[in-house]
Amino acid sequence: MTPVLEAQGLGKRYGRRWALSDCTIDIPAGHVVGLVGPNGAGKTTLLKLACGQLEPTAGDITVLGGRPGSTSAQLARVGFVAQDTPVYAGLSIAEHLRLGARLNPRWDPAMARERIGQLGLDPSRRADKLSGGQRAQLALALGLAKRPELLILDEPVASLDPLARRDFLWGLTEATVEHKLSVVLSSHLVSDLERVCDYLIILVDSRVRMAGDVDRLLATHHRLAGPRSALDRLPADQHVISASHADRQSTVVVRTDSPIHDPVWTVGRLSLEDLVLAYMDKHAVEVQR
Ligand SMILES: Nc1ncnc2c1ncn2[C@@H]1O[C@H](COP(=O)(O)OP(=O)(O)OP(=O)(O)O)[C@@H](O)[C@H]1O
């Protein structure tokens, strides 16, 4: 199956500063992919490269087998909802839907109407009279009704209340199953990502620190607690991702494919949030691919 997003040595530089460096990833289709990382890590830059709004400075990127933004057919296959949820202030909701129908060859009018109905929004209301969260919901409805094969969402839930966030994420999960949609979404809310994502990319300081299937990531990362002196005898296949120390005790997050047998360590499971924090930790000790 054609990967949804493939990048080889991808980089983007603004002036002298690399916003994204040496990014090599290969995301299979049919996933809901979470993109996480600290402020300024390069998430928006990667998403804009994927939808063709930015040109790479280095390397290559292929989306659904084509060059991002290269043809009108390619543009129709990819939906993008930017961080600032762009809608037209002077247009009503109904006018947005008419515009969507004109501009998008695969437009699904029934889906658009249904989503607006579910939100309880009056179609005659102008976008500049909507709250920030309602504008975000409108932008999301437009993105879904475009019926893309890949929907890219830059912090889609940041301005939604908890209930609206939950409903939106459910809707997204439904759409991925019903319409064979692949999704890449960035968010700082890892607990939300945990609910919907089955694939994760962690970006730190403009580099991919880890990318992979969520179940596999959780199965291969462990928290070890034990004496600091035992750190020196960790086997070579237990890669230390982050470590913290108190007196003679250490807590480390390790990545390994092998079982951990040394009885000196108390082995604990990680939540997705723990795992993300371990990679984002300033004291993280290893760069992953
Ligand atoms: N148009 C631009 N001109 C110059 N530098 C830019 C531009 N856009 C982004 N950058 C820089 O590139 C780096 C990555 O920015 P990017 O917006 O991709 O990060 P991000 O991970 O999406 O951050 P956030 O979580 O804060 O939204 C940052 O250092 C940012 O200052």
Image (cartoon, rainbow, N blue to C red):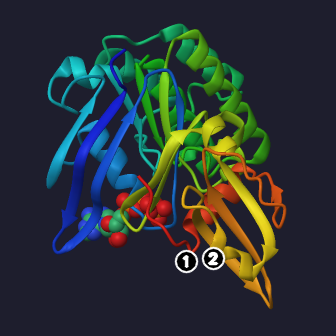
Q: Which mark is residue 151?
A: none
Q: Residue at x 28, y 41 (%)?
A: 7
Which amino acid lies under the numbered mark 2 shown in the image of this protein?
A: Asp
Q: Residue at x 74, y 37 (%)?
A: 166
Whole-percent x, y for residue 109 in the image? 48, 10
Query: Which quarter shows the N terminus?
Result: top left
Q: Quadrant of residue 76?
A: top left
Whole-percent x, y for residue 148 in the image? 40, 20
The residue nearer to you, when weighing 32 against 169, is 32
Marks counted in the figure total 2
Q: How many angstroms separate mark 2 from mark 1 (CA)?
A: 21 Å
Q: Residue at x 31, y 51 (%)?
A: 23
Residue density around tag 1, few if under 14, some if 14–19, many if 20 or more, within 10 Å:
few
Foreground tag (2 vs 1): 2
In the drawing, does residue 129 fall left or right of residue 81?
right
Q: Disc 2 on helix, strand or loop?
A: helix
The residue nearer to you, when weighing 229 against 94, is 229
Whole-percent x, y for residue 117 in the image? 67, 20
Q: Which mark is residue 282?
A: 1
N-terminal label among 2 and 1 = 2
* Ligand 1 image position (quadrant): bottom left
Q: Disc 1 on helix, strand or loop?
A: loop
Task: Give the answer, above or below, for where 66 lies relative to 13.
Answer: above
Q: Is mark 1 within 8 Å of ligand 1?
A: no
Task: Give the answer, above or below, for where 14 lies relative to 194.
Answer: below
The residue nearer to you, when weighing 261 against 152, is 261
| Residue bearing mark 2 | 232
Whole-percent x, y for residue 187 in the image? 57, 51
Residue density around tag 2, few if under 14, some if 14–19, many if 20 or more, within 10 Å:
few
In the drawing, does residue 30 fall left or right of residue 64?
right
Q: Residue at x 59, y 18 (%)?
A: 175
